[in-house]
Amino acid sequence: MEISHPMRDHAAMDKPNVPTSFDYSRIPEMPASVFVAPLRKPAELGDDWLEPAQRKYSLEEHRIWDELYQRQIGLMPGHACREFAHGLERLNLGRGGVPDFSEMSEELRSLTGWSVVPVPMLIPDHVFYYHLANRRFPAGNFIRSREQFDYIQEPDVFHDVFGHVPLLTDPIFASYMEAYGRAGWKALKYNRLKALSALYWYTVEFGLILEDDQLRIYGAGILSGPTETVFSVEGRSPNRIHLNVDRVMRTDYTISDLQATYFVIESFRELFHLTEQRGFEPIYESLAPAFQYAKTAALDTDHIYHRGTQEYELRGGRGSGAKPA
Ligand SMILES: [Fe+2]
């Protein structure tokens, strides 16, 4: 009988064997030691978690889309980056009601090879990576109710389509998203999923970009809601720090409130260069399993554009009555 050595077992669990190449046409294998949120797949869906068709929205649901769109579109000038505004215009997402995924995908495919596919809810990370690596963006097949008009934690079709899809028309950002999906395979093997999620959070969801020396937004989590659209660019409270990938992948983040820190890039070319061109493997090798930096931290080694007062955070954030400022 072979006796296993606990220390050795722990090391093996922390960094499983890494293959040198991956088959991105298949859903990646999920190592047993990797922690993922326990999501229950509806019985009628296959392993790819895709819904057979986009749902037929009621008139009231289409109206909710139109109202969310109207509220958000007016805030885009002076806040959204130009690539996002250009994508919104190209896809004409305000033509009335929840956009038709097949029409939208046809246009997207001709521009960058991406498509939008319906999913019932949040899907497991490894399935999400599989779709991104194949240039498919999974979007929620439901819309928030009127009671959830101002805030919804689960990503619905408005967040996913209005927030994420316009930038998929930009060739460089489109390549970054595919590269991110591929990077997921390696993160699974190195057990560094949380670090890779922090990168997604601080770029794809909550990223800022410099445009003619002005802060502009490219993150979908910001652009799909009015409060953070203003707070992220104009607020005194949050830090704005130049993106350093190694640092960001070690940084904790806020899930259900406004961010304490935003990371800023100079261009999508820079983002692509800092991640895919440099390669994710050396980064995973150097990372510890847990986050090292608090979400409010501003480090001596950071390139800081604005050191925030953190007053919103210090007063208790959402639910405390603190005014986002
Ligand atoms: Fe999102």
Image (cartoon, rainbow, N blue to C red):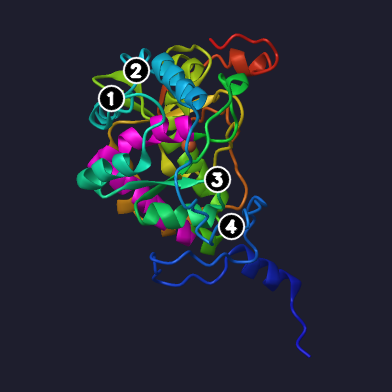
Residue 235, given in percent of the width and then of the height, sits at 48, 12
For label 1, the residue is 85
User: Label 3's element?
Assistant: loop
Q: CA distance from mark 3 to mark 2?
A: 28 Å
Q: Is residue 278 left or right of residue 261?
A: left
Check if mark 3's residue and mark 2's residue have beta carbons within 8 Å: no
Left or right of 5? Residue 149 is left
Residue type beneath disc 1: Ala
Q: Residues within 10 Å of mark 2 (few under 14, many from 20)?
A: some
Tell me which residue sits at (31%, 14%) in the image. Answer: 77
Alpha carbon distance from label 4 to label 3: 11 Å
User: What's under tag 4, amino acid-wise?
Assistant: Glu
Question: Which comes sooner in the sequence, label 1 or label 4?
Answer: 4
Q: Amino acid at mark 2?
A: Met
Q: Nearer the viewer, residue 11 or 157?
A: 157
Q: Which residue is identified by label 4?
A: 44
What label sits on residue 76 in the rendered view? 2
Q: Which mark is residue 120?
A: 3
Foreground disc of the pair 3, 2 = 3
Q: Circles 1 and 3: CB distance less than 8 Å?
A: no
Tell me if residue 170 is in the magenta stretch: yes
- The answer to which of marks 3 and 2 sits earlier in the sequence is 2
Q: Residue at x 39, y 35 (%)?
A: 164
| Label 1 C-beta lies within 8 Å of the nearest ligand 1 atom | no
The quadrant the N terminus occupies is bottom right
